[in-house]
Image (cartoon, coloured by chain):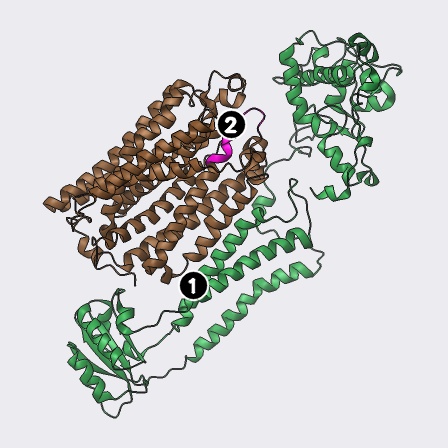
Amino acid sequence: MSDSNEKLHGIVAYFTDIDGLMAAARKVRDAGYKRWDSYTPFPVHGIDEAMGIKPTILPWIVLVMGLTGLSLGILLQWYTNAFDYVFLISGKPDWSLPANIPVAFEMVIAFSAFTTFLGMLALNKLPHLSNPLHKLESFRRITDDRFAIVVEAADKNFDAGRVRALLGAASAEQVEDCPVDTSRAALPLWFHGLAAIATCLTFIPLAVAFKGRFATSEKPRYHVWPDMDWQRKRKTQTEWEMFPDGRAMRLPVEGTIAQGELRDDFELYFGVDQDSFVPDRVSYDAGAMGPSAEGRPAWLTGFPTAMVVDEALLERGQQRYDIYCSVCHGQQGNGLGSVALRAKALDAQKWGWVDPKSLLADNAKSYSNGEIFHIVSQGVSTMKGYGAQIVPRDRWAIVAYVRALQMTQGINRRELNRLGVDPADLKPVPTIDDVRVSSADAGR
Amino acid sequence: MIARDLSKPAATGLRVGVIGIAATAGLGYGAGDHLSHFGHSMLVATMFFLSICLGALFFTLLQHVTSAGWSVVVRRVAESMTGALMFLFPIVLLLIGVPALMKNGFLYDWMATDAEWVQNNTFIQAKTGYLNGPFLFVRILIYFAIWIGVARFFAGQSRAQDDDQDPGRTLKMQRAAGICIILFGLATTFAAFDFLMSLNAEWFSTMYGVYFFAGAFWSSLATLALSTMWLEKRGQLQGVVTSEHYHDIGKLMFAFTFFWSYVAFSQFMLYWYADIPEETHWFNYRIWGDWTGFSMLLLVGHFAIPMLGLLSRHVKRNRKVLAFWCFYVLTFHFVDLYWNVMPELANGLPGENPAQAGVPFSAMDLTAMIGVAGIFVFGFLKTLDGKPALAIGDPRLPESMAFQNI
């Protein structure tokens, strides 16, 4: 029992089992006390009802914050994708709900989870660094095998004698007074100093980041991981003094050819007669191609002897054509690929865009097979070469398929006569000039 | 605690079942579409009640695999529900297995293996190693062998425990539950592929099994709560099952409202984002065309409304309000299955565009549901009749009866 001169924090009653605690809790509840609590070594089911604790408002706070997270998640994506920096990604609308849902969902979870955790702490007035109860020797057992009820002196109905009598009558094992903690509450000076220094230190990384972001410097940038930035290896197309010729890249040993690099079949690999000279991309620009060019290579007019032109080859050609060529030249070969249509919708000519050629045009038909093969391999004008992506046999398959397109899509007059069809009845294959697109389609 | 006098409602169920299915068949013949609509209506109804049985089986397994104590008072109800699997088995066999052997494409287009368009279809031809009549027939036998075998084992052990009170049986079930839940998962996933996804044999989704399972468990929780309330009303389980247990069933139902939406959206979003024709066409004729409204109904009704409705704990603890949401959940599980099955009625038919063939409501949809419901009720109540309505021998029964959420 405490000294009667000491101010009282509250009165503690200890119980040996849950049933005693619950019965006492109901009595304290019914006696009308408000400032009191139960202390148990583990969560006790039903204690809320026994103590008369009202349901917490935390779920409502979480609901509101979850909805806030939902709105912020959608707002963030609208602002970044559809307002501040509009950027077309794989043809999707700038701002569309299906793409927004994962991020919005995560924001709901993040906001709800943090609100639940921090809200629980705040509503329980935690963290609470000190409590007078911690000074009591017997109170330590409530983390082990005792249950306690504490009625605080701050309760407006508090009367020490009546509380003691109430708890004593409720089969408490022991009833004890808890004095107010009179020990010094202020933190020691060294702690304040340490906290101030630590707070200042936390500003350093922030300051460095700000300086890097907004200040200019003549020094090279700081390398955090120098062994990654300067690896002990030579990159391609650089010098290396270790070799007499000073190159980091090595040439093949004289008289050898790397596997798969032997290209002695000129027909198959270059589209020219055996031992003709082999043009590169530059020689095309110098007029090496086309029907009237002089000094042109001996372009192959048929197919290489190594190739068998049959239905399987045409099917392969169609497949490869649809993958590599049709996006610009269109599946019909008339130049109405999806890239071409979109460029038209954006009016890309003002930026120097050149429409893809119609493969059904007369000059395209006039090229020999070898020339078409060469164009597929090396490119022409603004078209890039596809030699690196498509193996030679597949390039020939594409040539065969382009020929098939030219024969079937642009039907010639003699053929029509033979079939007895009036050319006027046929609709011409549309070209890029026939297409009307509105700029509203540009975003689609 | 013995569930008495259930033979009368069970017999009524059987009578309703036979009459309902006969009426559906009669309407089906009358429709003159080679029983196609009849088949689809019956499939929706059969899958509806099969999914409830499978959800109940999963519920039983889940309690053992997590060694849960709270659920002991309602576990017997779930165990009894799985008894209806026996009676759904012949329906599935007649509806799916036999046509597969007879190469009849009235329900599943791919089964008409002699039809020219099936033979010319690259997608279906590439799958014949899996999608062929004899193999499917064998698979149906395997699925039901697993489901019925597992269900009978757990129901049987639980029943035997009523008499001998042997806690060893609880440990035995707990040990078996792990492997059984894996078998259940495999059988249910592939059954969803075979029974529902292969309606459109060109389409594929690895997520479909989970999607079906999510709806199955969702609706089975609703059935579990409703059955328990019904038994309480008849004087069984009274004072044993409390609002605490309904609260937990309600929590699971809320969780699976979200889980279903999560899985359904994941399935949709991956296809929407990749935008590849052979993957999106299944969604295409459901979203753009005559089914648009129905799809929106599913989105709002299967996700948004029950999500908000089941959010509050007061809803889950009040029997009357929870009963309303249980009926609601069952309604939208039907809507979900209808949305999965019925667009395929027109899909695959030459000259028919499922997006423009309309939502084919028919009286058959209703009579099929009533008929199979009768069979389900018969199987469920016949299993429960004359037995204790709760697992009286379970060592965790006192824990379950004293269970409190807070």
Q: Nearer the viewer, residue B242 or B143?
A: B242
Question: In terms of image quadrants, where is residue A142?
Answer: bottom left
Question: In terms of image quadrants, where is residue A296?
Answer: top right
Task: From the image, state the color of chain A.
Answer: green
Per the rendered image, the range of residues in magenta is B341-352
Q: Callout 1, which amino acid?
A: Thr
Q: Nearer the viewer, residue A206 or B62?
A: B62
Rate crowding at label 1 as few (under 14), some (14 to 19) or many (20 or more) other CA atoms within 10 Å.
some
Q: Which residue is mark 2?
A: B202
| Chain bearing mark 1 | A
Residue B209 located left or right of residue B118: left
Q: Callout 2, which amino acid?
A: Glu
Q: Position of residue B338 (x, y in %)?
A: 46, 39
Q: Is residue A69 visible?
A: yes
Residue A264 is tagged as: none
- The nearer-to-camera label among 2 and 1 is 2
Identify the secondary structure beneath mark 1.
Answer: helix
Q: Position of residue B247 (x, y in %)?
A: 32, 57
What residue occupies the far bottom of the structure in this picture? A5
Q: Is residue A107 above or below residue A289?
A: below
Q: Is residue B245 above or below residue B127?
A: below
Residue A228 located left or right of residue A191: right
Q: Is residue B97 magenta?
A: no
| Chain bearing mark 2 | B
- At x 55%, y 36%, the residue is B358
Q: Which residue is mark 1?
A: A116
- Colour brown, chain: B
